[in-house]
Image: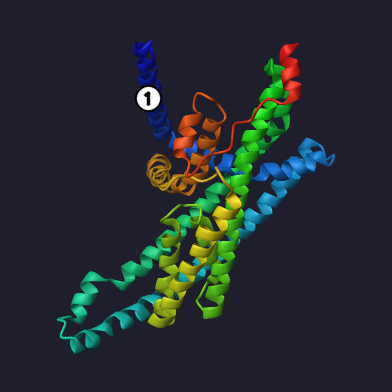
């Protein structure tokens, strides 16, 4: 019996390794599917509300899809215009950064630090520093562009979701329990993603308002980046702050750059450490170790998109594991606290099972 159990574990581990290798090899296909799944899950509650109000399934899909296209197109337009304006201002920022860096030489001489202009330019090239920001912004733009193309996959996912209950009833002998299990799983995933999206939106909005108050260029762009990067745990907020702080230093000086950095710290501490855990509720958190490892794993599998979706994907896996007695202990080990009990059959389900 013990040998069979050990063999089952080895087979399971081998299967996981093979699946991960397959996902890595097919990342050009799996990345659009992952993005589409993410968008479809976020849109699912709104689609359900429309259908419950008597709107036909195809019409509900069309309405939700239209909103997604309008919002996605608007974001893409804002990002593209901001990036183009930033690239036009890039030579000015490079010159300003060079002036700031050479201004450090007299300050170093006051403290008897052997520093020359050539040494500064050799180690910190303004063109390279500011150019790297432009490259990163272009990557964000291409990510949004690919997300826009994923809409085609989202259409089919939404249409499939509308027909899912009928298919489950036809395919499952215990349809009521299967529907309850699926509904409970989707409700918890939707709750997590909806709260995370709202928290990220508020974070981006606060960053935008703070940068507007300080007079930093392109505040909407930096706020949007802060919103997107908030989905990346631990390092996301740090990455989002770097270009805004650097631009504030170049544009306004070191004092305002410090205020920008302070604003990012306060906003992320309040939203990420105080408000988000309060509304996420018990059992929807991940342990810090799991967060870090998931960031590495999904980042390795799918690159920047994997890092962006690392926590949502891990949360989906965790919630799915918690629904079955055989794998519930794995979900508990992934949690930061004890998760809620799995979905239990309803009374009608018990009656149908007896019959």
Q: Write down the residue under mark 1.
A: 13
Q: Quadrant of residue 56?
A: top right
Q: Quadrant of residue 14?
A: top left
Q: Quadrant of the N terminus?
A: top left
Residue shown at 71% from the left, 49% from the top = 66
- Label 1, secondary structure: give it: helix
Q: Vertically, is 195 above or below 242?
A: above
Q: How many marks?
A: 1
Q: Position of residue 291 (x, y in %)?
A: 43, 46
Residue shown at 75% from the left, 16% from the top = 352
Residue shown at 37% from the left, 81% from the top = 96
Q: Position of residue 59 (x, y in %)?
A: 79, 40
* In the image: residue 185, left or right of residue 215: right
Binning the other alpha carbons within 10 Å of mark 1 as few (below 14), some (14 to 19) or many (20 upward) gives: few
Q: Position of residue 321 (x, y in %)?
A: 52, 31
Q: Vertically, is 334 above or below 84?
A: above
Q: Is residue 169 visible?
A: no
* In the image: residue 29, left or right of residue 201: left
Q: Position of residue 294 (x, y in %)?
A: 42, 42
Q: Quadrant of the C terminus?
A: top right
Q: Vertically, is 27 above or below 100?
A: above
Q: Is residue 39 visible?
A: yes
Q: Nearer the viewer, residue 1 or 63?
A: 1
Q: Nearer the viewer, residue 90 or 9?
A: 9
* In the image: residue 229, left or right of residue 246: right
**Image colouring:** rainbow
């Amino acid at each position: 019996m013990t040998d069979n159990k050990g063999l089952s574990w080895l087979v399971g581990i081998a299967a996981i390794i093979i699946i991960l290798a397959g996902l890595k090899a097919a990342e050009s296909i799996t990345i659009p599917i992952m993005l589409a799944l993410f968008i479809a899950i976020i849109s699912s509650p709104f689609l359900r509300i429309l259908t419950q109000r008597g709107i036909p399934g195809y019409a509900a899909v069309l309405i939700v899809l239209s909103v997604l296209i309008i919002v996605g197109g608007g974001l893409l337009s804002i990002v593209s215009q901001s990036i183009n304006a930033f690239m036009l201002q890039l030579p000015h920022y490079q010159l300003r950064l060079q002036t700031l860096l050479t201004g450090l030489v007299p300050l170093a001489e006051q403290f008897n630090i052997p520093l020359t202009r050539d040494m500064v330019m050799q180690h910190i090239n303004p063109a390279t520093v500011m150019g790297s920001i432009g490259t990163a912004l272009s990557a964000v733009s291409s990510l949004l562009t690919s997300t826009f193309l994923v809409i085609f996959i989202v259409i089919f996912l939404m249409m499939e979701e509308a027909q899912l209950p009928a298919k489950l009833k036809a395919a499952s002998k215990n349809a009521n329990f299967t529907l309850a299990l699926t509904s409970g799983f989707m409700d918890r995933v939707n709750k997590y993603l909806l709260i995370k999206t709202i928290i990220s939106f508020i974070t981006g909005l606060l960053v935008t308002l703070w940068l507007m108050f300080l007079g930093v260029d392109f505040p909407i762009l930096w706020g949007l980046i802060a919103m997107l990067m908030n989905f990346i745990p631990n390092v996301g907020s740090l990455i989002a702050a770097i270009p805004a702080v650097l631009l504030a230093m170049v544009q306004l000086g070191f004092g305002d750059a410090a205020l920008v950095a302070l604003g990012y710290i306060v906003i992320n501490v309040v939203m990420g450490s105080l408000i988000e855990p309060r509304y996420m509720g018990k059992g929807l958190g991940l342990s810090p170790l799991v967060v870090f490892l998931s960031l590495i794993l999904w980042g390795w599998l799918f690159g920047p998109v994997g890092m962006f979706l690392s926590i949502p994907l891990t949360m989906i896996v965790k919630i799915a594991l918690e629904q079955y007695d055989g794998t519930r202990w794995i979900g508990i080990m992934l949690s930061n606290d004890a998760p809620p009990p799995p979905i239990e059959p309803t009374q009608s389900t018990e009656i149908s099972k007896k019959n």
